[in-house]
Image (tube, rainbow, N blue to C red):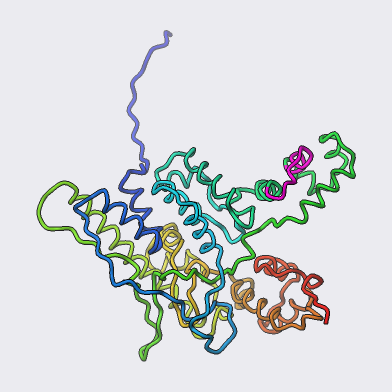
Amino acid sequence: MKPGNRISVQQTQRLALTTGLAASIQVLRADSEGLSRYLEEQAAENPALVLSRPNPVEWTPRWKSVLGTGGEPPEAEAPAASLVSHALALVEALGLSAADGRIAHALVDALEPSGWLGRTLASIAQSVAASLQDVESVLERLQVRAEPSGLFARSLAECLRLQAVDAGDLDPVMIIVLNRLDLVARGDVHRLAREAGVDEATVLARIGTLRGYDPKPGSRFEPFAASAREPDLIAEKGEAGWTVALNRSALPTLTVPDGRGTGRAGARALVRMVEGRNATLLSVGQEILHRQVAALEQGPGALVAMTMSDVATSLGLSESTVSRVVAGAAVDTPRGTWWLRALFTQSLHQGGLSAGALRDRLARLVRAEDPAAPLPDEALAAALADEGGAPIARRTVAKYRVQLGIPPAHRRRQRR
């Protein structure tokens, strides 16, 4: 039988990331500050889009931080630094172009509490409609200027490599050690020495240097407190209970003049995107804070277990939509300005305290301890178990202590 060509018809479905869809995702993910910049750029390109700013106000968070002690602290105190606010200040200092600025803000949105990037560069490039090369270029600038070094790393090896470069420790032997962290983890010093062509003492010296680096540089920042910029939402308690509203002063007002002309259709589409973003943000914020009323009343020590899936199911949204809208959004409360994303927390035990509540109580226990006799992890676990009514493993306490940037007991000890 002779081979021949055959024509067949197949039907497939796929989602194409059009310019409109990319813009809609960008608007949904943006906080008030980032969205304001984006709208200003669009208004500069499209004369049919008119922006008007509310009267400028100096926004000062009412309380110092979400992890503060009880009572009413002075209103003028500055909030504790957060990883996101620190990273946004770095972006601002770089003086990037509008296009590079959008990439940089997407990289900031992708930061995990550890200080590493939680998304691939390819997905970030797709979300901002940029090339992978442009994203890599902006990332390199952020990594070089980041303080502490190691922020914006994509892996443990890259995080340690950035710190080695900053400390001037990146020699040929260190490069081999960083490339073979699997051997470091197994303690196979002999093989490392053979591959590096040096003696084992030299390899051990490099490993000792690595141990002085911080594998999670983002953990030293305040995990809950948002930056001192204007928040996206405002939560207040009135006679009828808690209310959550959009902070209208944080965004410019958009109008499109009546009539026909070039750019009006695009301007009206952008207005609809912003209105949709505001409505989604408000509904998600209301649902989150409705579930976390105890935290509003008592502080983060009363955070209850809550996942993005819970909120998405309740509102009839997709989990990805909830994740995007809370990415950089903050809410002002009587207990400080909080990141919405920080209010999501898992439950360790059925009916027990949430992970967020345990971290808050751990921080309070450490602040209240005797500096001359700090509590070891075993004692902290026992104290948390007494408060929560459920056993807490020592390794769990150690993990949360590292996340909060709290050193071990022997390093917290202070001589009298």
Count of numbered tags:
0
Q: Which residues are magenta?
A: 166-178
User: Is residue 368 toward the left or the right of residue 123 in the image?
Assistant: right
Locate residue 132 relative to residue 181 in the image: left or right: left
User: Does the magenta-highlighted stretch encompass residue 69?
Assistant: no
Which residue is drawn at the image coordinates 50% and 60% (left, top)?
A: 89
Q: In the picture, which quadrant includes the C terminus? A: bottom right
Check the image and name the residue furthest to the left. Answer: 259
Give the residue displayed 56% in from the left and 63% down from the top. 83
Q: Is residue 199 above or below residue 288?
A: above
Give coordinates of residue 90: x percent, y percent: 52, 57
Which image quadrant: the N terminus? Answer: top left
Most foreground residue, 383 or 45: 45
Which residue occupies the foreground of this view, 235 or 197? Answer: 197
Residue furthest out toward the bottom:
239
Where is residue 29 drawn, in percent x and y? 41, 58
Residue at the image position 53 percent from the left and 58 percent from the top? 87
Q: Quadrant of residue 233?
A: bottom left
Q: Position of residue 316 (x, y in %)?
A: 37, 64
Chief secondary structure of the magenta portion? helix
With 346 as the anchor, is 179 left or right in this view? right
Farthest top residue in view:
2
Residue 31 occupies which quadrant of the picture?
bottom left
Residue 208 pos. (x, y %): 82, 52
Vertical placement of residue 126 versus 250, above or below: above
Direction from residue 342 to residue 400 in the image, left or right: right
